[in-house]
Amino acid sequence: MSGIDIIIKRILRDIQVELGDEFDKNFERQGFFSQSWQRRKSPTRPGGHILVDTGGLRRSISSKADSTGIVFQSTLPYAAIHNEGGEIKVTRKMKRYFWHKYYEATGSFGRKKNGQRRNDKRTVQLSTEAEFWKWMALMKEGKSIKIPKRQFLGASPEVEKAVRDIIEENLTEYFEHEYNLQ
């Protein structure tokens, strides 16, 4: 393996590690580098991190490198719609899921001894959440739901700068090392 092949391999490995860390940090930043994600309109999980419910989407990001480049990807079917935004059509299966979430929320209400709902903070939150799921379940099949773009992977000025810095650092180190050997 020649010196150039070694330096290219090292550059690609460094880029893969650095960008993997940065793309993961987008979930902590709740935005794509300096561009914040649009806030949720639904009352579910108020104050919770956007795009982080179970952490599955965040954990699904992987990368593959070969001698020509690096590809970052997610195997989850819903990753693309969140990363790029777009519209999805309400299906019968989605409506069943919305009804499930509605019944799940209503079954969790705190009750007084006489059977009435408590008026505590948690029950009020669940009531709001239950209303949201009911509203979603009552949508007609075929209606479009707009999913805002909440990019977590892709090109950006920050990505380009990180790649440029890694290349410059590795090349400088390589040529300084080569120069010192002679």
Image (cartoon, rainbow, N blue to C red):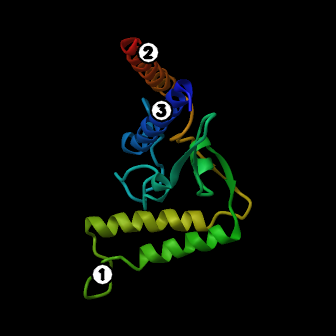
Name the residue: 28% across, 70% down.
Answer: 119
Query: What separation in Å lies between label 2 and label 1 (alpha carbons)?
Result: 73 Å
In the picture of the structure, the residue carrying the numbered disc 2 is 175
Which badge, 2 or 3, comes first in the chain's sequence? 3
In the picture of the structure, the residue carrying the numbered disc 3 is 10
The kind of secondary structure element at disc 1 is loop
Residue 146, image x and y in percent? 63, 48
Give the amino acid at mark 1.
Arg
The one of 181 and 84 positioned closer to us in this rendering:
181
The kind of secondary structure element at disc 3 is helix
Name the residue: 46% across, 19% down.
Answer: 171
Query: What separation in Å lies between label 2 and label 3 (alpha carbons)?
Result: 14 Å
Given the current orientation, which residue lies at the most extreme bottom position? Answer: 114
Given the current orientation, which residue lies at the most extreme front position? Answer: 182
The one of 67 and 48 positioned closer to us in this rendering:
67
In the picture of the structure, the residue carrying the numbered disc 1 is 111
Q: Are marks 2 and 3 in contact (CB under 8 Å)?
A: no
User: In the shown orientation, is residue 167 left or right of residue 115?
Assistant: right
Residue 48, image x and y in percent? 36, 53
The one of 71 and 11 positioned closer to us in this rendering:
11
Q: Are marks 2 and 1 in contact (CB under 8 Å)?
A: no
Dividing the picture into quarters, in which one does residue 127 lie? bottom left
Residue 65, image x and y in percent? 57, 41
Name the residue: 43% across, 62% down.
Answer: 54
Give the amino acid at mark 3.
Arg
Query: What separation in Å lies between label 1 and label 3 (alpha carbons)?
Result: 62 Å
The one of 150 and 33 positioned closer to us in this rendering:
33
The kind of secondary structure element at disc 2 is helix
Location of residue 160 with respect to 32 vertically, above or below? above
Residue 75, image x and y in percent? 60, 56
Which badge, 1 or 3, comes first in the chain's sequence? 3
Label 1 vs label 3, nearer the camera = 3
